[in-house]
């Protein structure tokens, strides 16, 4: 007998009165996989990630309007002019956050995080925008407006954004 | 203007957490059979154009659905086009169809939305797939989720305006209660504010019962010139004429942090509402709109919406909602269908289902338990991301 090798599930749904699909109540479902791997360029944002390996926190500066963007923006959205890299001291203020109890497990770095984890938005000193990242601190020590700083990871990571995270500024 | 589109007919499936027996094509077939019953048409051969509304190639695991779906519902070789705008897809599709009719490109256009967001993938995979519409390297890769982005916005709203979890729990309770009056709703629930506050935290300050549903479902609306509708849809003459009178659309940064210091509310939604109000001649929306379907992807988002749509002043949404003014019987009933929280949200069909609810309300055909008496003008509010794309559509009864 021929067989279906993927995990399958066949059921007969109960017919309901007046159902136009009475002839179509037998349902088979398969469990299939769709996996992909691909080359992902960090493009014009690359230097940010490369400098994290050197324990430096970079942002972009627009010579036209003076806006400092972290995360970086190679093209200033206000002036439509190419920006330039600058280094920020890496200290800042917690502006808002969420406590995530459910992890999407987006990559190996995220899958390794214990839950709950703190997804924080930080206004870095010298920046005009908020930078999102994990804030590693006990929940009871977290409050809006607290001072934080960039910490650099000593462990190997899958995605270079995990070369940094935030901690309370001592 | 004679080319202002009218709603010639509507159809939708019940929204469900999982339709074992349906892929996207099967769901659309059900919605179209409902449309035929609604319009009195026996087929779609007279329809001049199609407009396909679905968000995700990932969830549906099928690309180029527009032509495939046309084949499914007997619309070949009629032209079609796909519109995609994240969570706003269905509303953006209707807005696009508005322009197709207004331009004279066609006199009738079937807007068909479908999505299989239910249980085809795990919650974890669903969150990853949805997070692909966030910023991959800067948000998704650190474990960000949409629940988390919305939650961070709500925390800022709470901090700035004193909004409370009890206030947004009111939305979670009311919309699920309204869903009980809608036979096509996915998950009506009879719950209390205390139940919401006791549900498990997902992304604080949001808890499980603050979160909307993942759904399988389809919804269709036939838009046409009034002349075409009179000539081709037998039931049209038996109903008040409902026109699609105005539409607005706005955009904002993908990342919340790039909006600093404006992180409590939705700029794109304000822009969309202003355009739509100007087009419809609305100067006092709370007074001039009778019923509205708001994008309650999370309970607190409705609080932000009533502010950004200009129903109440910025910062007063929480107290206004808790007062009951947006409940059935209130000043401006919202989410009478149950909203995304209770009716469900198969993304490409969501904005269309919202407009169907407004059509039923304006025709006076909603279940009596949720019918807003004498409703003459209704609004839909639909957005993508954290209102990265926002669409406001306005419908009016003309008689």
Image (cartoon, coloured by chain):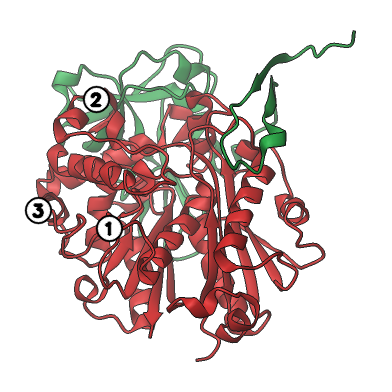
Considering only order in the chain, which callout, 1 or 3, is on the residue closer to the N terminus?
A: 3
Pick out the residue farthest to the right.
Answer: A1
Q: Chain of mark 1?
A: B
Which residue corresponds to the image point at 19% horizontal and 43% vertical from the top-left? B168
Res B67 → quadrant: bottom right
Determine the secondary structure under disc 2. Answer: loop
The chain coloured red in the image: B
Task: Judge by depth and name the residue closer to the eye, B316 or A46.
Answer: B316
Whether residue B55 can be seen here:
no
**Circle 2 residues within 10 Å: few <14, some 14–19, many ≥20:** few
Residue pointed to by mark 3 = B323
Work out whether disc 2 and disc 1 sit on a shared chain: yes
Q: Is residue A51 above or below residue B220?
A: above
Which residue corresponds to the image point at 13% horizontal and 48% vertical from the top-left? B160
Residue pointed to by mark 1 = B334
Whether residue A27 can be seen here:
yes
| Quadrant of the image containing the N terminus of chain A | top right
The chain coloured green in the image: A
Left or right side of B162 for B5 = right
Q: CA distance from mark 2 to mark 3?
A: 23 Å
Tell me where residue B297 appears, x and y as whole percent.
Answer: 36, 45
Tell me where residue B129 appears, x and y as whole percent.
Answer: 54, 34
**Circle 1 residues within 10 Å: few <14, some 14–19, many ≥20:** many
Residue pointed to by mark 2 = B199
Q: Chain of mark 2?
A: B
Determine the secondary structure under disc 1. Answer: loop
Pick out the residue farthest to the bottom.
Answer: B1
Task: Judge by depth and name the residue closer to the eye, B252 or B368.
Answer: B368
| Quadrant of the image containing the C terminus of chain A | top left
Considering only order in the chain, which callout, 1 or 2, is on the residue closer to the N terminus?
A: 2
Res A150 → quadrant: top left
Return the mark for residue B345: none
């Amino acid at each position: 007998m021929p067989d279906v090798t993927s995990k399958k599930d066949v059921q007969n749904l109960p017919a309901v009165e007046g159902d136009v699909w009475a002839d179509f109540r037998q349902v088979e479902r398969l469990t299939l996989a769709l996996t992909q791997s691909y080359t992902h360029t960090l493009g014009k944002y690359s230097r940010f990630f490369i400098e994290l390996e050197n324990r430096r926190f970079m942002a972009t500066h627009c010579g036209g309007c003076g806006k400092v963007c972290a995360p970086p923006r190679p093209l200033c959205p206000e002036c439509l002019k190419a920006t330039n890299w600058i280094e920020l001291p890496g200290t800042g203020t917690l502006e808002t956050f969420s406590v995530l109890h459910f992890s999407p497990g987006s990559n190996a770095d995220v899958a390794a995080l214990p839950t709950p984890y703190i997804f924080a938005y930080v206004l870095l000193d010298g920046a005009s925008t908020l930078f999102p990242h994990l804030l590693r601190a006990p929940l009871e020590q977290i409050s809006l407006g607290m001072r934080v700083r960039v910490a650099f990871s000593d462990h190997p990571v899958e995605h270079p954004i995990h070369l940094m995270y935030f901690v309370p500024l001592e | 203007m004679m080319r202002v589109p009218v709603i010639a007919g509507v159809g939708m499936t019940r929204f469900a957490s999982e339709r074992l027996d349906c892929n996207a094509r099967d769901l659309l077939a059900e919605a179209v059979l409902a449309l035929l019953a609604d319009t009195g048409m026996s087929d779609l051969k007279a329809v001049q154009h199609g407009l396909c509304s679905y968000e995700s190639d990932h969830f549906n695991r099928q690309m180029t659905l527009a032509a495939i779906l046309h084949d499914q519902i007997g619309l070949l070789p009629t032209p079609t086009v796909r519109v995609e705008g994240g969570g706003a897809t269905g509303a953006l599709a209707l807005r696009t169809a508005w322009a197709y009719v207004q331009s004279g490109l066609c006199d009738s256009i079937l807007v068909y939305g479908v999505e299989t967001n239910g249980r085809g993938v795990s919650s974890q995979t669903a969150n990853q797939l949805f997070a692909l519409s966030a910023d991959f390297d800067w948000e998704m890769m650190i474990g960000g989720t949409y629940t988390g982005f919305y939650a961070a916005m709500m925390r800022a709203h709470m901090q700035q305006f004193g909004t409370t979890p009890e206030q947004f729990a009111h939305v979670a309770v009311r919309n699920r209660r309204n869903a009980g009056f809608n036979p096509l709703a996915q998950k009506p629930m009879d719950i209390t504010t205390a139940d919401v506050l006791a549900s498990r935290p997902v992304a604080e300050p949001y808890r499980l019962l603050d979160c909307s549903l993942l759904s399988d479902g389809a919804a269709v609306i036939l838009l046409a010139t009034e002349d075409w509708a009179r000539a081709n849809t037998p039931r049209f003459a038996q109903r008040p004429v409902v026109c699609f009178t105005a539409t607005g659309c706005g955009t904002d940064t993908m990342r919340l942090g790039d909006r600093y210091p404006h992180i409590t509310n939705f700029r794109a939604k304000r822009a969309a509402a202003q355009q739509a109000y100007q087009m419809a001649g609305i100067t006092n929306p709370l007074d001039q709109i009778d019923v509205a379907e708001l994008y309650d992807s999370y309970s607190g988002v409705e609080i932000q919406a009533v502010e950004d749509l200009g129903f109440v002043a910025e910062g007063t949404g929480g107290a206004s909602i808790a007062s009951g003014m947006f409940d059935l019987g209130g000043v401006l009933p919202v989410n009478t269908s149950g909203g995304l929280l209770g009716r469900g949200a198969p993304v490409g069909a969501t904005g269309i289902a919202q407009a169907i609810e407004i059509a039923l309300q304006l025709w006076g055909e909603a279940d009596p338990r949720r019918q807003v008496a004498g409703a003459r003008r209704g609004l839909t509010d639909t957005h993508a991301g954290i209102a990265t794309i926002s669409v406001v559509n306005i419908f009016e009864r003309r008689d």
